[in-house]
Amino acid sequence: MVEVPDAGGVYTPLYLQYSDFSTDKPDIVIDETKFKREDYPTNMADEMISYMESYSQFCRELIFFQGFTLHASAVEFEGKAYLFSGPCGIGKSTHTHLWEKVFGQKAKIFNDDKPAIRKMDGVWYAYGTPWCGKDLIQLNIKVPIAGVCFLKQDNLNVIRQLPKSEALAKLLEQSLHRFRNTERLDLMLGLADAFINEIPVFELANRPESAAAILSRDNMKKIAEERGL
Amino acid sequence: MKIKEGFIIRKVAESWAVIPVGKAQYDFNGMILINQTGAFLWNLLKEDTDIEQLANALCKEYFIDKNQAKEDVEAFIESIKPSNCLE
């Protein structure tokens, strides 16, 4: 579905990383001649700029396929996707790694930075993407979403389901890409609207410990089952 | 007083989201969530108007007294000011 052309030279590592995702007939083609290097600090590594710029292009095109990306770490558990989101450094990756530690083989992280989200045949799926963070944790799979959880750091572990208005603000914070045109923004808001109305959204205040993983898994799984997700 | 160019308003879940697009993003890089009453006032602010007129409209629409309406309008204007959306 997505093609990232081989640029050779400096960009080769990026291409190799993305080659798991290439197909015969791309719907979206990343055009690196349009990368805006001037928008970044001069001492930023080319690979990093390519990562951000290709991601940016992807988001802008994905919206026309009724999809968006979320800044989250996505873990598959018993066939369902649980997404942990929040700003950089909040502990998304730490939390999903705890899931793998506590639940062993039953839990598998399939994207550690920016999974794509799209509704297909009435089901909201989270997708692995090449934009998967510095540890390169990625699987080219799609998994039906059971829930999304925003993290915050605290001295205790408490989870609550968010009311829709709060869920909306947090979802847009971690996904709204700077759209310069109204059409894309309008599409994005439409997707956010549909998503929040169908997928439960939580906030977990937590310490980086196993009990937090058990708490999030128990609560999110319970609500998902009640909702038939 | 009216809303500047470049802000879109759209109903999302149970609120109305107000977001800048294009150049308006340079003044305000965020989003405001407003309720139904706020959305009602926002639409009126698309044309040049003032607190008096907005309060009158609120009175008619919601059957509240003038003083209450004025307070509500002023509170609303204060709440959206930080986004630099008014001119």
Image (cartoon, coloured by chain):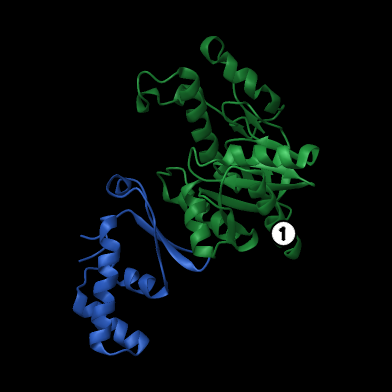
Chain colours: A green, B blue
Residue that lies at the very extreme toward the front in this rendered image: A155
Residue at x 50%, y 20% (from the top left corner): A47
Residue at x 65%, y 40% (from the top left corner): A96
Indicate the position of residue B41 as horizontal and vertical percent values: 32, 73
Q: Is residue A30 visible?
A: yes
- Name the one closer to the observer, A61 or B19: B19
Indicate the position of residue A97 as horizontal and vertical percent values: 66, 37
**Is A153 on the left-hand or right-hand side of B21?**
right
The secondary structure type at the circle numbered 1 is: helix
Residue marked by disc 1: A224
Indicate the position of residue A33 as horizontal and vertical percent values: 47, 22
Residue that lies at the very extreme toward the top in this rendered image: A9
Relative vertical location of residue B26 with respect to residue B87 in this rendering, above or below: above
Q: Is residue B85 visible?
A: no
Task: Please identify the quadrant where the C terminus of chain B is shown.
Answer: bottom left
**Is A10 on the left-hand or right-hand side of A25?**
left
Residue at x 69%, y 42% (from the top left corner): A99
Task: Please identify the quadrant where the N terminus of chain B is shown.
Answer: bottom left
